[in-house]
């Protein structure tokens, strides 16, 4: 007989623990978090991004505060899946972040269309464009995290690709 407990035991397992998601932009960095069960992603804050060392400091503080099991960072890809200069920039940023928060693992996940989706959602909910700029990156981080959580829920594997810390 199939019960919810049996179904869960036989299907993919999701790791328990809070995660943080980061949407890296040139001017701003959106941050989101989820509950320990990985059910709901919520916005945390927008970190100014132009001063990269200060941004890394703030992200390290957030990691210390939230104690996530991992940090997922959105990797911008083209619609065809390729990587351009923006992806290279995010990879460099992520490598430094991974060094600064080790041993907390960092994973890169595909963020195609997250900012567009976040913009549409904010507009649909009546958020004005001026106010929207301050929260768009947080909303994109929420979408990145929700997609990562769903990926793990379905596959039973951590989402995206792990970032190896190079010293």
Image (cartoon, rainbow, N blue to C red):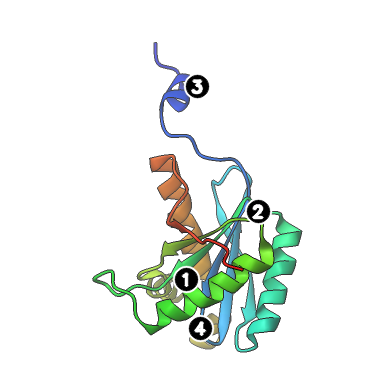
Q: CA distance from mark 4 to mark 1?
A: 9 Å
Q: CA distance from mark 4 to mark 3?
A: 45 Å
Q: Nearer the viewer, residue 65 or 56?
A: 56
Q: Which residue is mark 4?
A: 128
How crowded is the residue under tag 3: few (<14 C-alpha within 10 Å), some, or many (20+)? few
Q: Judge whether residue 85 can be spotted in this image.
A: yes
Q: Nearer the viewer, residue 131 or 28?
A: 28
Please, what secondary structure does the residue beneath circle 3 have?
helix
Residues at badges 2 and 3 in contact (C-beta under 8 Å)? no
- Estimate the x, y position of residue 55 in percent, counting from the top left: 66, 79
Q: Which is nearer the N-term, disc 1 or disc 3?
A: 3
Element marked by disc 1: loop
Q: Is residue 100 left or right of residue 151?
A: right
Quarter of the figure that contains the C terminus: bottom right
Is disc 2 placed on a helix, strand or loop?
Answer: loop
Q: Nearer the viewer, mark 2 or mark 4?
A: 2
**Percent position (x, y) of residue 59?**
67, 70
Q: Nearer the viewer, mark 1 or mark 2?
A: 2
Precedes in sequence: disc 2 or disc 4: 2
Q: Quadrant of residue 16?
A: top right
Please give the residue where the numbered disc 3 appears in the rendered image. 5
Residue at x-position 44% and y-position 71%: 118
Label ID, residue 116:
none
**Which dot, 4 or 3, sits closer to the camera?**
3
Decide: marks 1, 3 in contact (CB < 8 A)? no
Numbered circle sitting on residue 68: 2
Mark 4 or 3, nearer chain start = 3
Name the residue that disc number 1 marks.
125
Viewer-side residue, 158 vs 166: 166
């Amino acid at each position: 007989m199939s019960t919810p407990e049996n179904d869960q035991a036989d299907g993919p397992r999701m790791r328990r623990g809070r995660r943080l998601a980061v949407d890296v932009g040139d001017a701003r960095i959106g941050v989101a978090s989820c509950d320990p069960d990985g059910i709901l992603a919520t916005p945390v804050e927008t970190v100014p991004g132009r001063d990269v060392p200060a941004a890394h400091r703030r992200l390290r503080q957030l990691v210390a505060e939230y104690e996530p099991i991992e940090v997922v960072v959105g990797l911008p890809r083209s619609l065809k899946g390729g990587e351009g200069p923006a992806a290279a920039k995010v990879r460099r940023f992520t490598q430094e972040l991974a060094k600064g928060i080790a041993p907390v693992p960092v994973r890169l996940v595909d963020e195609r269309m997250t900012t567009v989706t976040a913009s549409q959602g904010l507009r649909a909910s009546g958020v004005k464009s001026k106010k929207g700029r301050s929260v768009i990156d947080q909303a994109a981080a929420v979408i990145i995290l929700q997609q990562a959580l769903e990926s793990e829920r379905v596959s039973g594997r951590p989402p995206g690709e792990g970032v190896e810390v190079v010293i």
